[in-house]
Image (spheres, rainbow, N blue to C red):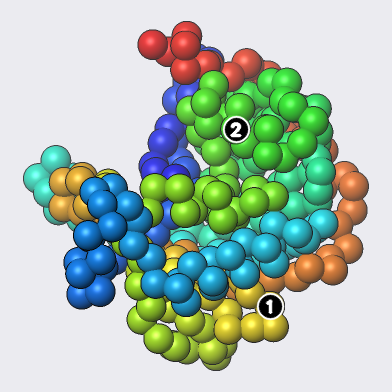
Amino acid sequence: MIRIVQMIVAAGLVSAPNLALVVAAQNAPPQANASQAQGPGVPVVAPDAELMLKQMAAYIGSAEQFTFQADITFDHVLPSGQKLQFSAVEEVALQRPNGLYVDWNGDLGDRQFWYDGKSVTLYDPATPFYASGPAPADIDAMLDKTEAQLNFTPPLADFLYHDPYQRVRRHVQYGFDLGSNDVNGQSCRTFAFVEQDIDWQIWINAGPQFVPCKLVITYKTRPSQPQFIAVFSEWDFAPRIAAPVFTPTPPAALVKVPFDTVTATK
């Protein structure tokens, strides 16, 4: 599920867009409306959209390691309703089963996130502390824990699961094929999906690497319907990732604090 959350760190608040995966389009296709005779609440997804989602998920989910970069733009809505747009660059290095590093550099601040199979660590250079806490021994379980107990996950986290299909498909109501388009010189298939709270659109490389090329999410139940856009590049499925990449390296002078939990916050 794609949402914007806040990272709560003990005595301070570290905020950042938490954007795992889920995308959608504003209107259901005509064939979807005609197919509602299947029964209320039955998802209607075009076969090509279903197939490409599965191919993408199988391709990146089965990879033992990969790196990628995402150029991101996202809206921030003022109380007046005015939308302000900001940018960020996210770099990700993943090594299954227990290595993840995310580096976020953006207009509203920077973040670094480490997972080494034993702990998760979050560092905001704008604060005099960093948060760290114990974590499960594999990436999927770690992401589940951070979402459920700590109320955050790294941006675009749905793509990091071993089975991304289950993450992106679970709340879809409608999905349809928008044909082929070019994204940064790559031929990509375009699909749109509708969920209750968001609409999303995804561009998937037509092959042989079935990787996401672009993602657009519209938060349609929020004031002014803000959007999140990610353009992916530099996918590498045979990277040389040094082991220390996943070892937390916040400045030595900082104070280590525990994460606040959802239960404690409530």
Q: Which residue is mark 1?
A: 209
Residue 26, image x, y percentages: 22, 65
Q: Residue at x 75, y 70 (%)?
A: 236
Residue 46, image x, y percentages: 39, 72
Q: Which secondary structure lies at badge 2?
A: helix
Q: Would residue 174 be visible to someone looking at this image?
A: yes
In the rendered view, does 230 fall on the left or right side of 26?
Answer: right
Circles 1 and 2, Cβ within 8 Å, touching? The answer is: no
Q: Which one is nearer the viewer's eye here, 47 or 182?
A: 47
In the rendered view, does 42 fall on the left or right side of 10?
Answer: left
In the rendered view, does 263 fall on the left or right side of 210?
Answer: left
Q: Which one is nearer the viewer's eye here, 138 or 183?
A: 138
The amino acid sitting under disc 1 is: Gln
Q: Residue at x 32, y 52 (%)?
A: 42
Q: Residue at x 35, y 72 (%)?
A: 176
Q: Is residue 65 above or below residue 32?
A: above
- Residue situated furthest left in the rendering: 80
The amino acid sitting under disc 2 is: Asp
Q: Which secondary structure lies at badge 1?
A: loop
Q: Which one is nearer the viewer's eye here, 52 or 18?
A: 52
Q: Is residue 67 above or below residue 102?
A: below
Image quadrant for the C terminus? top left
Image quadrant for the N terminus? top left
- Sequence-first disc among 1 and 2: 2
Q: Which residue is mark 2?
A: 144
Residue 36, image x, y percentages: 23, 60
Q: Is residue 190 above or below residue 147?
A: below
